[in-house]
Amino acid sequence: MRNVILIGPMGAGKSTIGRLLAKELRLPFKDSDKEIEQRTGADIPWIFDVEGEQGFREREQAVIAELSAQDGLVLATGGGVVMREANRQALHAGGRVVYLHTSVEQQIDRTSRDRNRPLLRTANPAQVLRDLMAMRDPLYREVADVVIETDERPPRMVVQEILSRLEALSPR
Protein backbone atom coordinates (compact mmCIF):
# COMPACT_ATOMS: atom_id res chain seq x y z
CA MET A 1 0.00 0.00 0.00
CA ARG A 2 1.18 3.49 -0.79
CA ASN A 3 0.69 6.23 1.78
CA VAL A 4 -2.46 7.89 3.01
CA ILE A 5 -1.80 11.62 3.19
CA LEU A 6 -4.03 14.03 5.11
CA ILE A 7 -4.24 17.64 4.00
CA GLY A 8 -6.45 20.51 5.12
CA PRO A 9 -6.45 23.71 7.13
CA MET A 10 -5.21 24.09 10.68
CA GLY A 11 -7.78 22.76 13.10
CA ALA A 12 -9.20 20.20 10.65
CA GLY A 13 -8.01 17.32 12.84
CA LYS A 14 -5.24 15.96 10.61
CA SER A 15 -3.01 14.84 13.50
CA THR A 16 -5.79 13.36 15.63
CA ILE A 17 -7.46 11.60 12.71
CA GLY A 18 -4.09 10.56 11.29
CA ARG A 19 -3.11 8.75 14.49
CA LEU A 20 -6.44 6.90 14.61
CA LEU A 21 -6.31 6.06 10.90
CA ALA A 22 -2.75 4.73 11.21
CA LYS A 23 -3.85 2.50 14.08
CA GLU A 24 -6.76 1.14 12.02
CA LEU A 25 -4.52 0.49 9.02
CA ARG A 26 -1.66 -0.80 11.20
CA LEU A 27 0.73 1.68 9.59
CA PRO A 28 3.24 4.10 11.08
CA PHE A 29 2.03 7.68 11.57
CA LYS A 30 4.09 10.75 10.70
CA ASP A 31 3.23 14.42 11.17
CA SER A 32 5.30 16.66 8.89
CA ASP A 33 5.32 19.55 11.39
CA LYS A 34 6.51 17.25 14.20
CA GLU A 35 9.21 15.86 11.88
CA ILE A 36 10.44 19.40 11.20
CA GLU A 37 10.50 20.16 14.93
CA GLN A 38 12.41 16.96 15.73
CA ARG A 39 14.99 17.58 13.01
CA THR A 40 15.60 21.21 13.92
CA GLY A 41 15.27 20.87 17.68
CA ALA A 42 12.98 23.91 17.60
CA ASP A 43 9.22 24.42 17.52
CA ILE A 44 7.37 25.84 14.51
CA PRO A 45 6.79 29.32 16.02
CA TRP A 46 10.53 29.65 16.71
CA ILE A 47 11.36 28.64 13.12
CA PHE A 48 8.88 31.25 11.83
CA ASP A 49 10.40 33.90 14.12
CA VAL A 50 14.01 33.17 13.16
CA GLU A 51 13.76 32.02 9.53
CA GLY A 52 10.42 33.51 8.50
CA GLU A 53 7.69 31.65 6.67
CA GLN A 54 10.00 31.19 3.65
CA GLY A 55 12.59 29.35 5.77
CA PHE A 56 9.91 27.15 7.27
CA ARG A 57 8.46 26.34 3.82
CA GLU A 58 11.93 25.27 2.61
CA ARG A 59 12.23 22.84 5.52
CA GLU A 60 8.67 21.65 4.95
CA GLN A 61 9.29 20.96 1.26
CA ALA A 62 12.33 18.80 2.07
CA VAL A 63 10.39 16.79 4.68
CA ILE A 64 7.37 16.35 2.38
CA ALA A 65 9.58 15.12 -0.48
CA GLU A 66 11.22 12.57 1.81
CA LEU A 67 8.11 11.32 3.63
CA SER A 68 5.86 11.11 0.57
CA ALA A 69 8.51 9.01 -1.20
CA GLN A 70 8.20 6.34 1.51
CA ASP A 71 5.71 3.49 1.35
CA GLY A 72 3.10 2.45 3.84
CA LEU A 73 2.53 5.31 6.24
CA VAL A 74 -0.16 7.76 7.24
CA LEU A 75 1.09 11.33 6.88
CA ALA A 76 -0.51 14.43 8.40
CA THR A 77 0.69 17.66 6.78
CA GLY A 78 0.73 21.31 7.76
CA GLY A 79 -2.08 23.53 6.54
CA GLY A 80 0.10 25.49 4.11
CA VAL A 81 1.74 22.49 2.44
CA VAL A 82 -0.33 22.95 -0.74
CA MET A 83 1.03 26.42 -1.42
CA ARG A 84 4.06 25.01 -3.24
CA GLU A 85 3.65 23.19 -6.53
CA ALA A 86 6.52 20.83 -5.65
CA ASN A 87 4.65 19.75 -2.51
CA ARG A 88 1.39 19.20 -4.40
CA GLN A 89 3.22 17.00 -6.92
CA ALA A 90 5.00 15.03 -4.17
CA LEU A 91 1.77 14.49 -2.24
CA HIS A 92 -0.13 13.35 -5.33
CA ALA A 93 2.66 10.95 -6.30
CA GLY A 94 3.07 9.75 -2.72
CA GLY A 95 -0.27 8.04 -2.24
CA ARG A 96 -3.94 8.72 -1.67
CA VAL A 97 -4.59 12.27 -0.57
CA VAL A 98 -7.50 12.96 1.78
CA TYR A 99 -8.65 16.56 2.23
CA LEU A 100 -10.15 17.02 5.68
CA HIS A 101 -12.44 19.98 5.05
CA THR A 102 -13.70 22.03 7.95
CA SER A 103 -15.50 25.35 8.18
CA VAL A 104 -13.70 28.51 9.25
CA GLU A 105 -16.04 28.65 12.27
CA GLN A 106 -14.88 25.18 13.35
CA GLN A 107 -11.24 26.19 12.78
CA ILE A 108 -11.71 29.26 14.99
CA ASP A 109 -13.18 27.09 17.72
CA ARG A 110 -10.44 24.45 17.49
CA THR A 111 -7.47 26.85 17.28
CA SER A 112 -8.54 29.68 19.60
CA ARG A 113 -6.45 28.47 22.55
CA ASP A 114 -3.49 27.10 20.58
CA ARG A 115 -0.39 29.30 20.89
CA ASN A 116 1.60 27.12 18.47
CA ARG A 117 0.12 28.71 15.33
CA PRO A 118 2.36 31.52 14.08
CA LEU A 119 -0.04 32.66 11.34
CA LEU A 120 -2.75 33.30 13.95
CA ARG A 121 -0.64 35.66 16.07
CA THR A 122 -2.63 38.63 14.89
CA ALA A 123 -5.40 40.96 16.06
CA ASN A 124 -7.94 39.18 13.83
CA PRO A 125 -7.22 35.44 13.57
CA ALA A 126 -10.72 34.77 12.19
CA GLN A 127 -9.99 36.97 9.17
CA VAL A 128 -6.63 35.25 8.67
CA LEU A 129 -8.40 31.87 8.67
CA ARG A 130 -10.99 33.12 6.14
CA ASP A 131 -8.25 34.49 3.87
CA LEU A 132 -6.19 31.29 4.11
CA MET A 133 -9.25 29.16 3.30
CA ALA A 134 -10.11 31.27 0.26
CA MET A 135 -6.56 30.90 -1.03
CA ARG A 136 -5.91 27.26 -0.12
CA ASP A 137 -9.25 25.48 -0.57
CA PRO A 138 -8.91 25.26 -4.39
CA LEU A 139 -5.40 23.83 -3.97
CA TYR A 140 -6.54 21.26 -1.41
CA ARG A 141 -9.28 20.18 -3.82
CA GLU A 142 -6.85 20.05 -6.76
CA VAL A 143 -4.58 17.50 -5.06
CA ALA A 144 -7.21 15.50 -3.12
CA ASP A 145 -8.44 12.06 -4.12
CA VAL A 146 -11.17 12.29 -1.45
CA VAL A 147 -12.78 15.23 0.39
CA ILE A 148 -14.17 14.48 3.86
CA GLU A 149 -16.22 16.91 5.96
CA THR A 150 -15.04 16.99 9.59
CA ASP A 151 -17.29 19.65 11.17
CA GLU A 152 -19.07 18.48 14.32
CA ARG A 153 -18.05 14.85 13.68
CA PRO A 154 -16.20 12.59 16.08
CA PRO A 155 -12.74 11.59 14.81
CA ARG A 156 -13.60 7.87 14.76
CA MET A 157 -16.56 8.53 12.45
CA VAL A 158 -14.28 10.52 10.11
CA VAL A 159 -11.77 7.64 10.12
CA GLN A 160 -14.48 5.14 9.17
CA GLU A 161 -15.58 7.36 6.28
CA ILE A 162 -11.99 7.71 5.07
CA LEU A 163 -11.55 3.93 5.11
CA SER A 164 -14.73 3.27 3.17
CA ARG A 165 -14.05 6.06 0.64
CA LEU A 166 -10.48 4.89 0.04
CA GLU A 167 -11.65 1.31 -0.41
CA ALA A 168 -14.08 2.47 -3.10
CA LEU A 169 -11.34 4.15 -5.15
CA SER A 170 -9.80 2.29 -8.04
CA PRO A 171 -6.05 1.71 -7.80
CA ARG A 172 -3.74 4.21 -9.47
Image (tube, rainbow, N blue to C red):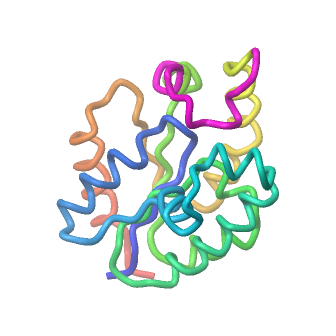
Where does residue 25 sit, x and y in percent of width and height? 21, 67
Magenta range is 109-123
Main SS of residues in magenta: loop
Question: In the current view of this chain or complex, which residue is farthest to the front?
Answer: 41
Q: Is residue 78 magenta?
A: no
**Measured along the vertical axis of the image, is residue 70 above or below residue 49?**
below
Q: Residue at x 62, y 52 (%)?
A: 140
Where does residue 73 sit, x and y in percent of width and height? 35, 73
From the image, which quarter does the C terminus lie in? Answer: bottom left
> As drawn, is 126 to the left or to the right of 73?
right
**Measured along the vertical axis of the image, is residue 82 above or below residue 71?**
above
Along the line of sight, which residue is nearer the eye, 126 or 31? 31
Where does residue 2 sit, x and y in percent of width and height? 38, 80
Q: How many marks?
A: 0
> As drawn, is 125 to the left or to the right of 153?
right
Along the line of sight, which residue is nearer the eye, 121 or 150? 121
